[in-house]
Image (cartoon, rainbow, N blue to C red):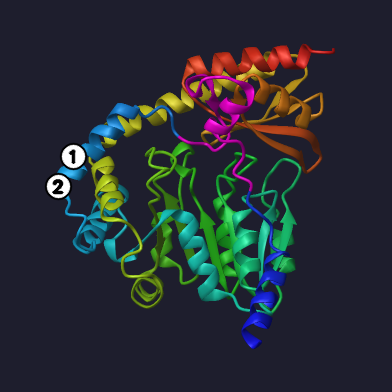
Amino acid sequence: MNGKKIIEEVISRACSLSIYDVGETIEGLASRIGRKTSEILKLNSNENFFISLEFVRSILRQVIEEVDPRIYPRDEFRELREAISRNTGVAPENIIIGTGSDQLIDLVSRIFLKEGDEAISIEPTFPIYERCVRIQNAEYRAVPLKNDFSLDADAILASITPKTKVIFLCSPNNPTANQLNHKDILRIAENFDGLIAVDEAYADFSSSSLINVADSLENLIVFRTFSKVFGLAGLRVGYAVANRRLSSMINERFQMPYSVSITALRAAVKMLENMDYIRETINAIKSERERLIRKLNEISGVRAFPSETNFVLFQVNKSSLIVYRSLLNRGIIIRNIGRVLKFENCLRVTVAPRHYMDRFTKDLEEVLWEGA
């Protein structure tokens, strides 16, 4: 009887948690609208389609020949930390490896938050922070960005209470696509006794990063991922950078010993060994991003915002939900965001190779003209 009561309590609490909507799937949409899967454009999750699929598969074929999946990964964690260190200049001892940055964000939430605590973040931002906080039965509070999407550091500092244990910041931010001012972030860190957790999933597409200052601060942790710039979203590899005391504590006391598969670890190492190619794709994304923003702003009824990520946020002069659904019917999946601060009817689209973007902008223009 007690067991049933406990289960009901957990289910009741679960019902108060938000569900993360991953959006339409390629197969599901293709079946629904009667199209081939190859005709579907998936532009809603900010994956990197500039990296050749054949290149990724060649990496995986090499990995399969090298690893023994019958044994647990051990040296592979060290090898990846060393490879990240060579690429970033961060000491291997400062690096925590995880199953994507989401798992590390969840881990930090479980370490630092308990019932009765609270965490602060910004609004709008990546919804995973709120999800992780509420799973811990902690309170989540969001401080709106300024209307130019910049960080309101004064408002965040004024929101801190004795119960505040973690502040989550996404920079560059999703969905606004702008990098937050690093001086503002460091000022918050200097005036806060808790942890500043900065999600830099999109930092490779911007101008700078905080990972190289993490070692000098007691209360800063920076998350990075292989899902975006390295094109390994399906393998789930991420890492965090913090000072050695914090990183060793998380690695040795809180992280699971075999948290990432041996295949994913070795694939990530091989991606870091091909940085010349990765840099080429970054430059290609930045170039196509600026072209996409120009093309969107040339369409009547569209306003595209600047971006330091591999996606673009834009506003339309019709219902964003109607535009989203109309594009779905044409085989194009983007993200309906809705209201962003004072801006109504916003949508988000992944920056993809030119032929994808040309089809997207052509169909978007036709959708906006429908019924005009």
The residue sitting at the left extreme is 66
Q: Is 192 positioned to the left or the right of 271 in the image? A: right
Foreground pick, 5 / 207 = 5
Does residue 250 lie above or below 286 as drawn? below
Place of residue 326 in the rendered image (x, y in percent of width and height, measured from the top left): 72, 22
Place of residue 284 in the rendered image (x, y in percent of width and height, measured from the top left): 42, 24
Badge 1: few (under 14), some or many (20 or more) residues near its Cα, within 10 Å? few
Q: Which residue is found at the position 65% from the left and 74% from the top? A: 10
In which quadrant is the C terminus drawn?
A: top right
**Is residue 42 found inside the magenta-colored segment of the image?**
yes
Q: Is 213 positioned to the left or the right of 111 in the image? A: left
* Picture quadrant where residue 295 is located: top right
Foreground pick, 160 / 326 = 326
Bounds of the magenta segment: 21-47
Q: Which residue is found at the position 30% from the left and 34% from the top? A: 56
Place of residue 256 in the rendered image (x, y in percent of width and height, measured from the top left): 37, 70
Q: Secondary structure at mark 2?
A: helix
